[in-house]
Image (cartoon, rainbow, N blue to C red):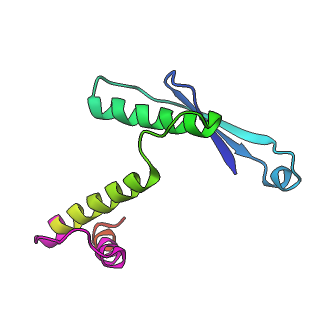
Amino acid sequence: MGEITWSGDGEITVAKLNQASVKAGKPEIFETYHIAITQSDDSWQKDLVASIDNFCQHILDKTEPLLAEGLAGVKSVELAKTAWASAYLGQWIQFPIKPIEIEQIYEKIKKEYGK
């Protein structure tokens, strides 16, 4: 029920929409936040910023090809969770792991560490 806008100038704008106005077909913004972001020379951060910008451009004009398909992101998260589970358990885990298995381990980790 909102919109996130990133103009690339170091600020993200988050606009929340009035739910009743959306249901009526005439969305109205009722609250806006501005979040300042700082960018560094870190290559990881630059890659992330480029990926976000590419994704936004793809959605907006439909002509920009995606740098990374959604499945690549899903696989990256799956790999990160598996690595975290392996460290938590102190043992090797065969990858790929069944999603239900990784989620069960991940839930144990969240309970133990509070989040």
Q: Which residue is at 42% across, 56% downward?
A: 71
Query: Disc count in the image?
Result: 0
Quadrant containing the C terminus is bottom left
User: Could you tell whether 26 is left or right of 59 in the image?
Assistant: right
- Choose between 39 and 57: the one closer to the eye: 57
- Residue 17 lies, with reference to residue 87, above or below; the image says above
Query: Residue 112, how many percent across, how many down?
Result: 28, 72
- Choose between 108 and 75: the one closer to the eye: 75
Magenta stretch contains residue 93: yes
User: Could you tell whether 2 is left or right of 81 in the image?
Assistant: right
- Choose between 18 and 83: the one closer to the eye: 83
Magenta stretch contains residue 35: no
Determine which quarter of the picture holds residue 93: bottom left
- Residue 25 lies, with reference to residue 14, above or below; the image says below
Query: Residue 101, how many percent across, how many down?
Result: 31, 78
Q: Which residue is at 38% across, 25% downward?
A: 39
Query: Residue 86, how many percent across, how many down?
Result: 17, 67
Determine which quarter of the picture holds residue 32: top right
Q: Which residue is at 56% across, 37% downward?
A: 58
Task: Give the residues in magenta.
Answer: 87-107
- Residue 26 lies, with reference to residue 98, above or below; the image says above
Q: Which residue is at 39% across, 58% downward?
A: 74
Query: Residue 107, how many percent across, how many down?
Result: 34, 74
Check the image and name the residue furthest to the left. 91
